[in-house]
Amino acid sequence: MVIEQIYTGCLAQGAYYIESNGEVAIIDPLREVQDYIERAEKNKAKIRYIFETHFHADFVSGHLTLSKKTGGIIVFGPNAKTKFDSHIAFDGEVFKVGDITITAIHTPGHTMESTTYLLKDKNGKDIAIFTGDTLFLGDVGRPDLAQKSNMSQEDLAATLFDSLRTKIMPLADDITVYPAHGAGSACGKNLSKETVGTLGDQKQHNYALRQDMTKEEFIKEVTDGLLPPPAYFPLNVALNKEGYKSIDEVIKTGAKALSVNNFELVANETDAVIIDVRHQFEFVKGFIPQSIFIGLGGTFAPWVGSLIKDIHQPILLVVPDNMEKETITRLSRVGFDNVLGYLSGGFEAWKTSGKEIDTLPSVPANVLEQQIDKDAFVFDVRRPGEYEAEHIENVPSTPLDFLNDHISEFPTNKDFYVHCAGGYRSVIAASILKARGYSKVIDVAGGYGAIKKTNIKRTQATACSNSK
């Protein structure tokens, strides 16, 4: 028996390859499926089942493409309804894969179709659970992503409490827990950096599995501090329910090299957003006017999904050499399929052509230290939890996720500074502000990590401030 976690860091997502005696099951596959196919072919095995733990909101799953290419049967849990052929399992249904079995355990709460899959070895011993977004390491799935008109997030949290107590916690402590996500996912609040653990460890250390916890306490703790989900989440759910284009087609149409003149022509004749995916250090030195920085070196796809509200938005790309397919693939993981092409030769081609370029002032933290006592405007674009832990005294919280909600707070006629934790998110924020006409924006290089090495006054927050 083989159990392999295939973890994608930029999505904080775990897919699973399970093989036994020539048969394979895939759980929660990514949209690009060739890797699973090649693994099975290498071992002369057949992909028999494609199990989905729920309708994912944070990425487009590969179930449909994988089924078309391999004949594998798509399996969802109870309550799921799809617009394509799929097998809707009943609670307790057993699927045989080679010498092992996989049992569907209905665990609603994160979503109403959420299902945990219990793997038993050939002797019938419980080996592992694949929990999707029902149970993470250190946390549980947020209960506000699948609300119906007759169910509040509190109702869903109560349902999740029951699922955990009646379906998962009675299982043996030595069972391995394989969740769908780790730290960095927006599907939970306090996910561990670890991506594999044991159920016994979770019973001891996961706040949501406390033995003495009441349902009321669970509901309060699980729903407390939830930020609004990213705008692309319901759009991804729809794709996962209804179907989508093959990623091969998406790459073929998007990986179109455009000369400098053609790139400019397409940009002028469409409402395309120009996304520059180079490193932030390169971007601040020079970029195409009105372009937005979202670097491949960070959590690229989730930030695109959070900041660009429409997955149908036309996109033009500025990428390093030979990174166009990788960029298009990452965009497609969150449903952004409408790439019109990329700049042939990258930014250097634009620069050498003599076309207009823009730059972004980026200063070290000691420069901010000199200006902070001169009533400098400073904005902290980290997430609320980071801000609450510690921040510059009298500086407001303006999270990058919700930059649009704070646009009116940024000055138009006076220099102002933006910082994040390390410099990635602040350059994203600054590029967006620059594109919208806020020409006085200055990035603080190195972010809060560098600020902490100065004498700038800092304080801990008791509540998030949203105004200067």
Image: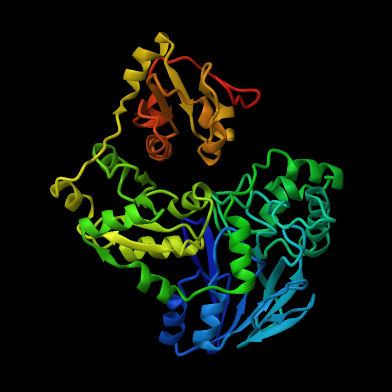
Residue closest to the eye, 19 or 141: 141
Residue closest to the eye, 468 or 384: 468
Where does the image place residue 260, in percent across and percent down from the top left? 21, 56
Where does the image place residue 44, in percent across and percent down from the top left? 45, 90
Residue depicted at 78% across the width and 49% down the height? 153
Q: Decide: is 93 above or below 57.
A: below
Residue 318 falls left or right of residue 154: left
Looking at the image, what colour scheme do you see? rainbow
Q: Which residue lies furthest to the front in this view?
A: 269
Residue 334 falls left or right of residue 364: right
Residue depicted at 59% across the width and 34% down the height? 385
The quadrant of the picture occupied by the C terminus is: top right
The quadrant of the picture occupied by the N terminus is: bottom right
Where does the image place residue 209, in percent across and percent down from the top left? 75, 50
Tally of numbered tags: 0
Q: Decide: is 256 above or below 70.
A: above
For residue 172, which quarter of the picture? Answer: bottom right
Residue 110 visible to an observer of this rendering: yes
Residue 46 visible to an observer of this rendering: no
Residue 80 falls left or right of residue 448: right
Q: Decide: is 429 above or below 77.
A: above
Residue depicted at 66% across the width and 49% down the height? 139
Where does the image place residue 109, in percent across and percent down from the top left? 77, 58
